[in-house]
Amino acid sequence: MRAPWILLALPLALAGCGKKPAGLPDDPIRRAATCGVVAAANARRALGSVDATLTIEQQAHILHYALIEGAAGGSFDRTRSAAVVNAMPKLGDKVTAGKWEPLVGECADAYPATRPVESVTLPSDPLTAEAGCHDLSDFITTALRSQEQNYIDRIRAYDAMERKLDNRMGATLKARGLNQVQANEARAKALAKLATLGPPIAVLDQCAKKFGP
């Protein structure tokens, strides 16, 4: 029951210096994409090299802005999420050519769900937790599949969780008597919920703890 996510390409944003930033764009797609670029630049600055391999947490942090924008309406919109990802490389040079560092704080304020959390509490509703964990894992692992060897242990754990949840989620959907359209709507709402619980890897690790093999 894998969702048909498109393959998400992560931008390799570079740190730069220049004129004072104009602040975040008003347009929500461009705003989320700008914050994704800033997250990539900040991650590479922290690692001290544009060629360094980002951690899975850093990669997911970049993607989180696309997840949050996709979840903005309360039911996950893959088209909006993809629009954010597609805008990132187009904005990359423009954003990082200036003084992007002040935007780190602005992005954290604009998207508080991206801030670190001490713990994650999954939804109490079984379908929301099962579908949300399954599809959040699918989103992240699909995006990082081409770099799987860099994160092999975590991705294998998430893949195993997805396989286990396939049957469990299917049984829950059947027990609730949902048709395919209703099931898709329930899954979209579940993913929107989990996208806003906190950093994606922190959420997925809690999912794997609850639903993993």
Image (cartoon, rainbow, N blue to C red):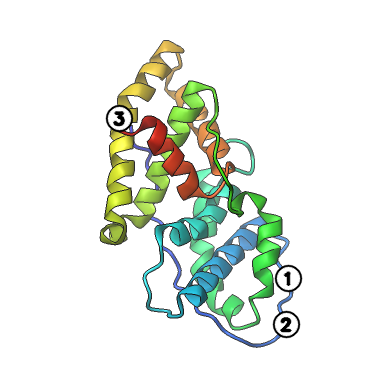
In the image, residue 104 sits, relative to residue 28, either above or below, namely below
Residue toward you, 80 or 72: 72
| Quarter of image, res 149 | bottom left
Mark 2 closeness class: few <14, some 14–19, many ≥20 residues within 10 Å: few
Write down the residue under mark 1.
23
Where residue 141 sits: x, y (%)?
35, 49
Q: Is residue 72 left or right of residue 212?
A: right
Where residue 50 sits: x, y (%)?
43, 79
Q: In the image, which disc is placed on residue 20?
A: 2
Q: Is residue 67 left or right of residue 3?
A: right
Where residue 163 sits: x, y (%)?
28, 33
Q: In the image, which disc is placed on residue 37?
A: none
Residue at 39%, 36% (x, y): give it.
209
Question: On the rendered image, what quadrant is the C terminus found in?
Answer: top left
Mark 1 falls on what kind of element?
A: loop
Residue toward you, 185 or 121: 121
Foreground: disc 3 or disc 2: 3
In the image, residue 41 sits, relative to residue 125, either above or below, namely below
Q: Is residue 13 visible?
A: no
Q: In the image, which disc is placed on residue 164?
A: 3
Question: In the image, what residue type sits under mark 1?
Answer: Gly
Q: Is residue 98 visible?
A: yes
User: For the view shown, which residue lies furthest in the front direction?
Assistant: 118
Nearest to N terminus: mark 3 or mark 2: 2
Foreground: disc 3 or disc 1: 3
Question: In the image, what residue type sits under mark 2?
Answer: Lys
